[in-house]
Image (spheres, rainbow, N blue to C red):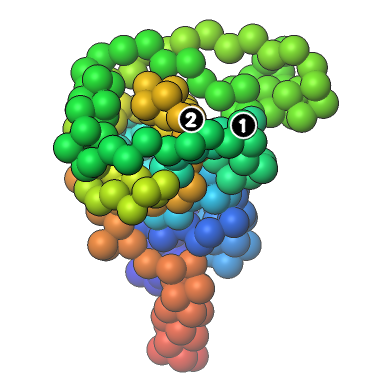
Amino acid sequence: MSVLQNFQEGAVLLINKPLTWTSFDVVRKIRNTTKAKIGHAGTLDPLATGLLICCTGKMTKKIDEYQAQEKEYTGTFTLGSVTPTYDLESEPQDHQPVPPLSQEELQAYANRFLGPQQQLPPIHSAIKQNGKPIYHLARKGVEVKVEPRQIHILEYEITKVELPLVYFRVVCSKGTYIRTLAHDFGAAVGCGAHLSSLCRTRIGEFRLDDAVEVSDFIEQYKAQQAAAAGQNG
C-alpha cells in the first residue's frame, strides 16, 4: 500500500505547529500535499507552538475522542501588565510594579487554581455568537457576552521565575484557555499578567517529542511518494 493510500484511508499525524501559523494553516498545507480529507484535534492560537494532532481519512472520526483528552502545556506569563487578548496578539497595557515574589509564593497562587472550576473564556476567541467567531465582533468593538465553562486544572506547576517572567507547566481538561489562566493568575497576584509564550506538549498519550515539523513531513512524504512511483515504474 502506498503512502498516499494510507493517508486517503486514514492516518494520525503528530505535528509541531510553527509559531505564527494558525492550526488551519497546518491542515491546509498537509491537505494540499496529500490530497486527503483532514482535520485537527484541538486548535492552537497563532502565537502558540507544539503538538497538533491531524487526522486523515477514516481517522477523522477519532477527532472528538482526541479533543476530549487532557492536555499539557508549558510556557511563560509576564507579570506587571495585561492585554485585551490576554496574550501578545495585542499590546501590553495597565503597567504595574511587580512584587518581589519567590517561586514558592507564586506556586501558592497557582495552587488556588487547582481542581474543577468555572472559567470565563476571553472575548478574543473563536467561540461563536450568532454564527460568527466572537473575536471578529470584539475587534469591531461590538459587545460580546461569554458564558463561563466548566474546566479542570489537574496540575499547575511554577517551574522557574525570572521576574517579570514566570515559567509554568499545566495539565488541564478540554476547553481550558491558558490565556485566561494567565490573566486570572495576574489578577490573583495583584499586578496583572498576560501569556507571553505557550507550547502544547501532550494530548492524552500523544507527546510533542514524537511530533514532526511540517516541512520535514512534506519532505518525507514527497520522498516516499517518489520512491513508490519508482518501484511501480
Q: Earlier in the sequence, mark 2 or mark 1?
A: 1
Q: Is residue 159 left or right of residue 145?
A: left
Relative image position of residue 164 (x, y in whole percent): 41, 47
The answer to whether residue 61 is visible is no
Q: What mark, if any, has residue 192 been given in the picture?
A: 2
**Picture residue at 17% right of the left edge, 37% below the top:** 104
Residue 209 to residue 138: above or below: below
User: Mark 2 packing: few (<14 Cα in 10 Å), some, or many (20+)?
Assistant: many
Relative image position of residue 138 (x, y in whole percent): 73, 24
As rendered, which of 70 and 121 lies closer to the eye? 121
Image quadrant assignment for residue 86: top right
**Picture residue at 59% right of the left edge, 56% below the top:** 20
As rendered, which of 29 and 130 lies closer to the eye? 130
The kind of residue tagged 2 is Gly
Quadrant occupied by the N terminus: bottom left
Q: Are marks 2 and 1 in contact (CB under 8 Å)?
A: yes
As rendered, which of 11 and 233 lies closer to the eye? 11
The kind of residue tagged 1 is Asp
Q: CA distance from mark 2 to mark 1?
A: 8 Å
Relative image position of residue 43 (x, y in whole percent): 49, 40
As rendered, which of 227 and 148 lies closer to the eye? 148
**Picture residue at 80% right of the left edge, 21% below the top:** 141
Per the image, the residue denoted by label 1 is 94
Q: Is residue 158 left or right of residue 82?
A: left
User: Mark 1 packing: few (<14 Cα in 10 Å), some, or many (20+)?
Assistant: few
**Which element is circle 1 on?**
loop
Q: What mark, if any, has residue 122 been given in the picture?
A: none
Q: Is residue 83 left or right of residue 204?
A: right
Relative image position of residue 63 (x, y in whole percent): 40, 36
